[in-house]
Image: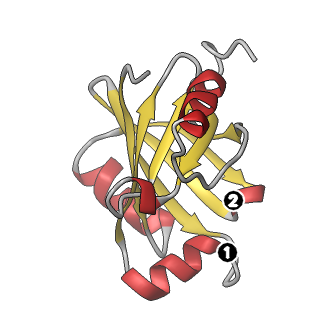
Amino acid sequence: MIDKIHHVGIAVHDLDEALKFYRDTLGLHVHEEATVEDQGVRAALLTIGESEIELLEPTSPEANMAKFLERKGEGLHHICFQTDDVDGDLETLKGKGVQLVDQKSRPGIAGMICFLHPKASRSVLVELATPMEMYRG
């Protein structure tokens, strides 16, 4: 089901300011940057070894990420596991009665993604992703 940790998501108030640390100070390479409209975030993926760090800035005060930042402040938001079959794994998890945020996969900056509900994973928001170059859906 899980191949590796794809990325760790970090909630930030200002993506450009966060990049000054992660890109400019630590020297991490920005692999991809995009606005994901349906998630209400502006995101950047930074490469570190075989994994990545995803920085997430809300695009509006109504976005879920803005609400997260109000409640918890900047910091760890989620962990994303890479899988070669996000759709199949989602069906397997449904069959096991795992509480989900997404009932089907959807496009995200990391590829085709879905989120499991934090109640299913000891209060950790878990994302599953199949990079687009691997996706067979």
Q: Please name whichever residue, 98 or 13, is drawn nearer the observer in this view of the structure.
A: 98
Taking the image as shown, residue 19 lies to the left or right of residue 24, namely right
> Alpha-carbon distance for marks 2 and 1?
7 Å
The residue at the point 27 percent across, 42 percent down is 27
Residue type marked 2: Gln
Q: Quadrant of residue 30?
A: top left
The residue at the point 70 percent across, 65 percent down is 40
Per the image, the residue denoted by label 2 is: 39
Residue with the most extreme front position: 96
The residue at the point 39 percent across, 64 percent down is 18
Q: Please name whichever residue, 69 or 84, is drawn nearer the observer in this view of the structure.
A: 84
Image coords of residue 93 (percent x, y): 54, 36
Image coords of residue 87 (percent x, y): 66, 26
Q: Is residue 11 above or below residue 24?
A: below
Q: Which quadrant would the N terminus be assigned to in this image?
A: top left
Q: Which quadrant would the C terminus be assigned to in this image?
A: top right
* Between discs 2 and 1, the one toward the N terminus: 2
Q: Is residue 33 above or below residue 75?
A: above
SS for tag 1? loop
Residue type marked 1: Ala
Per the image, the residue denoted by label 1 is: 63
Q: Name the disc covering residue 78, or none.
A: none
User: Do callouts 2 and 1 mark residues in contact (Cβ within 8 Å)?
Assistant: yes
Q: Please name whichever residue, 15 or 58, is drawn nearer the observer in this view of the structure.
A: 58
Taking the image as shown, residue 109 lies to the left or right of residue 26, namely right
SS for tag 2? helix
Image coords of residue 121 (percent x, y): 37, 53
The residue at the point 56 percent across, 71 percent down is 65
